[in-house]
Amino acid sequence: MGVHMIALPDGVRICAETFGDPRAPAIVLCQGASASMLWWDAAVCDLLADAGRFVIRYDQRDTGLSTKYPVGSPGYSHADLARDVLEVLDALGIERAHLAGCSMAGGVVLHLGLIAPERFASLTFISTSTGEPGLPAPEASFPETPSGLSELGAQVEFMLAQVRACDDVSPFYDDAAARALVQADAERSGDLRPALINHFLAELGHPDDASFADLTLPTLVLHGELDPVFPLPHGEALARAVPDSRFVVLPAQGHDLLPHNWERFVRELVAHTSAP
């Protein structure tokens, strides 16, 4: 296991952490909106490493220890967030990896699967959507962003309210564990406001006419049975859109990966990434 501060050509710094044997097949784990690397629990990364994978988690821009921008003024697009993955792989000397993205990071996976398929051995979409018309609206009731949020304690309470909206539909949701995670994220970051606000303001960017149907890499779609952000038909639609993809429902799962599904998640991801 090692922590790496990676300097990108544009002056941005990305914090990444690795688990396992660098000679093993690599898996890059990309998180969703507002989430630092901590939202890929270290225990999950250890389970993947113990199963013979070299695991990479990282703080995307505006989260954790990576470069942050003024609140309300992200100096990047979603396409930049995707290209950051390639920079991380280059810095770690990895020519080809497996790629997994959760929620907003489904756009990262789509973008990279289209512009750089030679760099990836497989794709995994988790709790995300095609965004196509006709899919069910979110069932989650998210809190409105309060003005200010200058105090770290207020940031923690706001982010925890968002987590509850995503996950307390599951009987396995643990509010104390969620609070501990949000508190750890806040203390490590020092300021959650860029993560809470900027990701939603950054310009969306995909290749022209981006289509899930154009993906050619082996693809796994994992989706929570009870996901209130992207209800289950979103995952089903994504699996239909990607040719020859495999679809797996995570039982009693909300939007985020909860501990009762960690072993199932690892088992599915290891099986999917068994090819070099």
Image: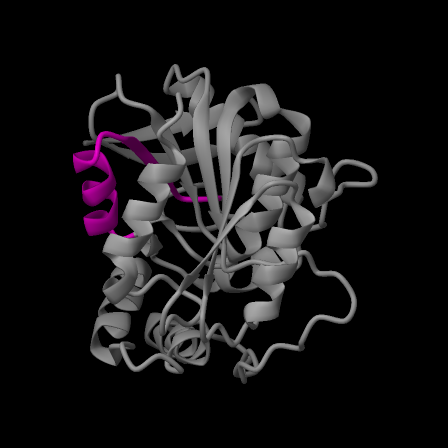
Q: Is residue 125 left or right of residue 51?
A: right
Q: Is residue 215 above or below residue 31?
A: above
Residue 1 x %, y %: 18, 31
Magenta stretch holds residue 43 = yes
Residue 21 visible in the picture: yes
Q: Is residue 221 left or right of residue 17?
A: right
Q: Residue furthest front?
A: 244
Q: Is residue 4 above or below residue 199?
A: above
Q: Is residue 54 left or right of residue 137?
A: left
Nearest the eye: 147 or 263: 263
Q: Which residues are magenta?
A: 41-60
Quadrant where the C terminus sits is top left
Q: Residue at x 50, y 60 (%)?
A: 127
Residue 72 visible in the picture: no
Residue 58 x %, y %: 38, 40
Q: Residue at x 52, y 57 (%)?
A: 103
Residue 236 x %, y %: 59, 61
Q: Is residue 259 above or below residue 121?
A: below
Nearest the eye: 220 or 1: 220
Q: Residue at x 28, y 71 (%)?
A: 178
Residue 180 x %, y %: 22, 69
Q: Is residue 239 above or below residue 94?
A: below
Q: Residue furthest right?
A: 209
Residue 154 lies in quadrant: bottom left
Magenta stretch holds residue 99 = no
Q: Residue at x 25, y 43 (%)?
A: 45
Residue 216 lies in quadrant: top right
